[in-house]
Amino acid sequence: MIRGIMLDENANGIALRKVGNTLRTSVYEQLMWAVDKLGVNDLWDGHVSVPELIYRPTGQKIILRGADDPSKLKSVKVARGRITYIWYEEADQFSGIREIDVINQSLIRGEGRYFCFYTYNPPRSAASPINAEFSKARADRLVHRSDYRSVPPEWLGSAFVAEAEYLKTSAPERYENEYLGIINGTGDEVFRNVRLEAISDEQIDGFSHTYRGIDWGYGADPFVYIATAYEDSNRTLYIYDEYYKCGARFDEIAEAINSRNPAKLIITADSAEPRSNDELRSRGINVRPAKKGQGSVEYGIRRLCDLNGIVIDPVRCPNAAREFAGYKLESDGNGGYRAGYPDRNNHTIDAVRYALEERFSRKSVGFIDRRRLGL
């Protein structure tokens, strides 16, 4: 930001923290550190009380603000040029990507290039909004990862390094997340094998075994159609298409499914709604009812957990990505977890279970043998 403003007389910057009272000891000090490292102290003035930094030759600014009330950022103006650089420090502390989008819409005005920086330590859970957002590929996005091993040790000091090395042996999972930025879960995730990755058209065309499922929803609950592929070679499930809508009518559901499944391949649907399935059949959808049965929920989820990986395209299937990554065991209030799996925020999960019901049938030889052996 410092260098960019000095090279562009129309550029200004803004540095943001979620809580305004943390600006002085974080972004302000970091920006003044950068001024000093660049050897341009004589060209910049820092004002702690405002707070802001001013480039003396032109009056260009870097404004520091808290986002405690994002609506107040709409009034941010600069006398010369426009805001070119936006920096979100500790971006994971903001209230989701929607809040960040609203702020960007307020600050980005006019033609030209803009640069938005998001710096943060990745939260442990893949379901964290910031982790989910930056797992998505965008042509105009660069994701850079660094940790304490990539900077000069003297910047950190021997005590910092010693603490990191101690945690490496005493609490390896904490070390991986806190010092290396690895997203390794919080212990209560049901699906620890989920990966949010782009799935290309070429991959989809090459899938040898595809499966489709429907979970019915009414009122506040959504209707869900899901398309998946399972590859035996690597025991990996790929979730690559979804239709997810509350209050969807039968005609629009049929239209959406026919556009996604023109070959009319079979779809396994929730059998609790036989009349709804009949409505789809009357519209040319190839639907069969799920068999379900006692214990089918637990069995289906265990089979999904047992896979080497569940790859979900977060752009094609944002709701599946959110539900699978965020599906957690319920706390019993005593440091443990309740038995069974929660029946909420699992609409795409149910649709996937139905889709794979025949593929993961209890009648498969492998399952029977494992049960007989007590495994």
Image (tube, rainbow, N blue to C red):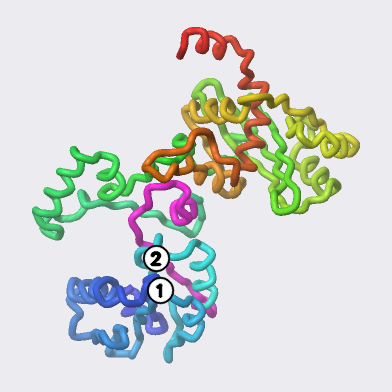
Position in image of residue 368 (x %, y %): 56, 10
Q: Is residue 347 left or right of residue 273?
A: left
Q: Could you classify mark 1 by the number of other residues whose Cα lies within 10 Å: few (under 14), some (14-19), or many (20 or more)?
A: many
Q: Residue furthest right?
A: 282
**Quarter of the rendering containing residue 264:** top right
**Quarter of the rendering containing residue 261:** top right
Residue 212 among those drawn in magenta:
no
Q: Please state which amino acid type lies under the numbered disc 1.
A: Tyr
Tags 1 and 2 touching, CB below 8 Å:
yes
Look at the numbered disc 1 and give the secondary structure of its residue.
strand
**Quarter of the rendering containing residue 175:** top left
Residue in view at x 71 percent, y 39 percent: 215
Residue in view at x 15 percent, y 55 percent: 152
Give above or below for 88 relative to 211.
below
Position in image of residue 60 (x %, y %): 35, 86
Residue in view at x 69 percent, y 26 percent: 292
- Magenta portion: prevailing SS class: loop
Total numbered badges shown on the rendered structure:
2
Q: Please state which amino acid type lies under the numbered disc 2.
A: Phe
Residue identified by numbered label 2: 117
